Amino acid sequence: MKLIRLLHFIFNRSEFLYLSFFSYLFRHFLQWRGVKFRGKVRFWGKTKVQMAKGSEIIIGENGRFRSKHTSNLIGINRPCILSTHVGNNCKIIIGDNCGFSGTVIGAFSQIIIGNNVKCGANTLITDSDWHPEDPRSSPPRPINIGNNVWLGVNSTVLKGVTIGENSVIGANSLVVKDIPANVIAAGNPCKVIKSINNNA
């Protein structure tokens, strides 16, 4: 029993040291690529980053990016991807204490994510139709996700949406319109189901 505990301790310790070392190196690599950090960030696996010239990506303190398949046991089917596609005021700004699991964030305009936001496995946040040459597309519109929002697994947030603070978006939801603060919302399209009573 003591041997098993010792092996368990050694494994956990070595995994922690590897994660810390990898995160340190990868953060400096992303800084070299132009990403700005406001504090320590942890990476489980390689987050893919693409930045257009003149654009900006800012990541807050204590961010967590899970891209390894086994780093979130609910199931991650892709790495985290952050991308900006045009210069001049195109930006992704992520607040403090945010977590992402296989999350894709693609900005052609502006995506602002507040503090303490949870993005469940395989979520997608994008402010564009991704085909600006197509006459059926409309221009990109900014996205604003408030503090303490929780996006459930496989949720998608599309352009022009604001999600108010403390709200929860249910799994597999498609958010195409604004969601107020302090509610639970879900569905395709996403609609408010009930209010959250913070005094309960």
Image (cartoon, helix red, strand yellow):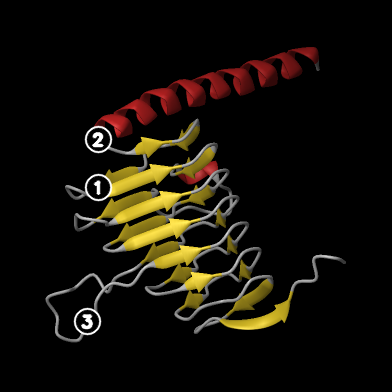
Q: Name the N-terminal-most of marks 3 and 2.
A: 2
Give the left or right position of residue 64, taking residue 110 as reference: right
Query: Which of pointers 2 and 1 lies earlier in the amino acid sequence?
Result: 2
Q: Quadrant of residue 58?
A: top left
Residue designated by label 2:
33
How far is mark 2 from mark 1, CA to CA?
Answer: 9 Å
Residue located 48% across and 76% down the image: 175
* Secondary structure beneath label 1: strand
Q: Which residue is mark 1?
A: 50
- Mark 3 crowd level (few <14, some 14–19, many ≥20, 10 Å Cα): few
Q: Amino acid at mark 2?
A: Arg
Percent of width and height locating residue 198: 80, 65
Report if the CB atoms under discs 3 and 2 are less than 8 Å apart: no
Secondary structure under the numbered disc 2 in the rendered image? helix
- Amino acid bearing label 1: Gln
Q: Is 140 situated left or right of 62 in this image? A: left
Give the mark nearest the N terminus, 1 or 3: 1
Residue 86 percent location from the top left of the image: 19, 58
Disc 3 marks which amino acid? Ser
Q: Indicate the quadrant where residue 128 lies.
A: bottom left
Which residue shows up at 40% across the image and 73% down it? 158
Crowding at dot 2, Cα within 10 Å, few <14 / some 14-19 / many 20+, comes out as few
Rounded to the nearest whole Å, what is the CA distance between mark 1 and mark 3?
A: 22 Å
Q: Is residue 160 above or below residue 153?
A: below
Which residue is found at the position 53% from the left and 19% from the top? 17
Q: Which label is found at residue 137?
A: 3
Whether residue 158 sits left or right of residue 88 in the image: it is right
